[in-house]
C-alpha cells in the first residue's frame, strides 16, 4: 500500500492511499464525524450526506465516508459551512417523517394502537379523530385509558431523556372529551352473514365491533344480566382507587 501524507484539520497525517477520509479521521481520533447511511460492513454509498467534510480545492463538500484520501489532500472536518450542510441534509431526510415509520409505542402496544397518531391528533385538538383512530385497533379505549398496563410507555423513547410521554393519560383525556363517540363508524355494506359470539366481555364486544365494521351481523350471547364481562365485573376496587389517585408507579423496562 502506498504511503501518503495529508493534512486533516491542519495536522499532518501519515496514512495509506485508498482509505476513506472517515476511516482516517476515526483511526487518528481527529473528530467525531456523524454518519447515517454508513456501515463499516458495507461498501460506501454516500447517500445521506450527513458526514460531509471540506477538501481544499474542491468547491463542494464531499461525503467523508465515500471519498478516498490522496497525497497532499487537505481536509477540514468541522466549520460553520460543514455543520450547516449536515443540518440541512438531516432536515431533508426527516422532512416527511414525524418520527419513526412505526413508533416504539405502537409496536409496544399489544393491540397495535397508533399511539403516535392519536397523540398527534389530540395535540391538534382533534379529539374525536383521535378516538376514531384508537378504535381502528381497540374499540374500548375509555376503559383502556383507565386500566391499561401501558406497555407503550414502557418503550417510549422519551424516558431516555426524562420520563415517558403520558400516552395512556392522553387516551383517557380524548375518550372523555365531549363528542368523542359522536357519529357512526364506517362499515362495509351488509354481507347477509351473521356470527354468534358467546360472551359479551371485552373479547366478544371487540369481535362484534370488527365483524360489524366488515358488514357482518354479530349476535352476542351473555350469561350475565349486562354486557362488559371483565371490564364491568372484573376490575378490582384498588385499581380504581389507584387510578383516582393518579399514576405513580415506576415503569420497568
Ligand atoms: S454517512 Fe451517509 S453519506 Fe456518509
Image (spheres, rainbow, N blue to C red):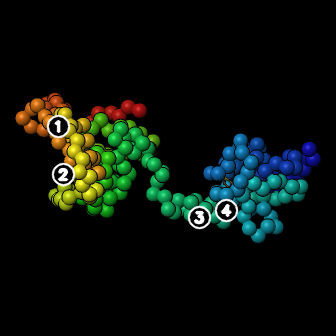
Q: Residue at coordinates 31% horizontally, 54% vertically from top-left?
A: 133
Tell me the SS state at disc 3. Answer: helix
Query: Between residues 207 and 125, which one lies in front from this camera angle?
Result: 207
Which residue position holds label 4?
A: 82
User: In this figure, which residue is indicated by the disc labeled 3?
Assistant: 88
| In this picture, residue 87 sits left or right of residue 109 | right
Residue 157 visible to the viewer: yes
Q: Nearer the viewer, mark 4 or mark 3?
A: 3
Q: Does 189 sit above or below residue 195?
A: below
Q: Please give the name of the residue rendered at 55% of the width and 62% of the height, measured from the top-left corner.
A: 91
Spot the residue most to the front: 192
Residue 44 coordinates in the image, percent (x, y): 73, 51
x, y percent for residue 208: 22, 44
- Marks 4,2: beta carbons within 8 A: no
First-in-chain label (3 vs 2):
3
Quadrant hosting residue 229: top left
Q: CA distance from mark 4 to mark 2?
A: 49 Å
Q: Nearer the viewer, residue 159 or 239?
A: 239
Which marked residue is nearer to the observer: mark 1 or mark 3? 1
Q: CA distance from mark 1 to mark 3?
A: 55 Å
Counting other residues with Cα less than 10 Å from the Cα at mark 2, is it few (<14), some (14-19), or many (20 or more)?
some
Which mark, residue 176? 2
Crowding at dot 4, Cα within 10 Å, few <14 / some 14-19 / many 20+, comes out as: some
* Residue ID for mark 1: 200
Label 4 secondary element: helix
Mark 4 or mark 1, which is nearer to you?
A: 1
Structural distance between the alpha carbons of marks 4 and 1: 62 Å
- Give coordinates of residue 92: x percent, y percent: 56, 63
- For the point 83% across and 53% down, the residue is 69
CA gap between label 3 and label 2 equals 41 Å
Residue 150 as seen in the image, left or right of residue 85: left
Amino acid at each position: 500500500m502506498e504511503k501518503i501524507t495529508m493534512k486533516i484539520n491542519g495536522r499532518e497525517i501519515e496514512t495509506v492511499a485508498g482509505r476513506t477520509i472517515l476511516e482516517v479521521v476515526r483511526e487518528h481520533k481527529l473528530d467525531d464525524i456523524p454518519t447515517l447511511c454508513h456501515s463499516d460492513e458495507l461498501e460506501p454509498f454516500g447517500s445521506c450526506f450527513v458526514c460531509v467534510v471540506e477538501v481544499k480545492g474542491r468547491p463542494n463538500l464531499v461525503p467523508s465516508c465515500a471519498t478516498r484520501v490522496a497525497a497532499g489532500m487537505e481536509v477540514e472536518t468541522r466549520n460553520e459551512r460543514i455543520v450547516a450542510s449536515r443540518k440541512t441534509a438531516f432536515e431533508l431526510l426527516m422532512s416527511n417523517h414525524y418520527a419513526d415509520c412505526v413508533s416504539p409505542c405502537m409496536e409496544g402496544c399489544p393491540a397495535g394502537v397508533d399511539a403516535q397518531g392519536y397523540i398527534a391528533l389530540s395535540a391538534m385538538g382533534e379529539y374525536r379523530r383521535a378516538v376514531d383512530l384508537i378504535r381502528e385497533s381497540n374499540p374500548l379505549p375509555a376503559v383502556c385509558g383507565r386500566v391499561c398496563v401501558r406497555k407503550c410507555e414502557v418503550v417510549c423513547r422519551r424516558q431516555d431523556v426524562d420520563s415517558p410521554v403520558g400516552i395512556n393519560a392522553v387516551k383517557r383525556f380524548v375518550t372523555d372529551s365531549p363528542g368523542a363517540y359522536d357519529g357512526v363508524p364506517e362499515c362495509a355494506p351488509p354481507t347477509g352473514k351473521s356470527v354468534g359470539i358467546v360472551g359479551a366481555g371485552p373479547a366478544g364486544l371487540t369481535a362484534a365491533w370488527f365483524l360489524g365494521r366488515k358488514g357482518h351481523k354479530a349476535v352476542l350471547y351473555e350469561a350475565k344480566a349486562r354486557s362488559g364481562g371483565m371490564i364491568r365485573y372484573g376490575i378490582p376496587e384498588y385499581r380504581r382507587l389507584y387510578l383516582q389517585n393518579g399514576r405513580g408507579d415506576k415503569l420497568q423496562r
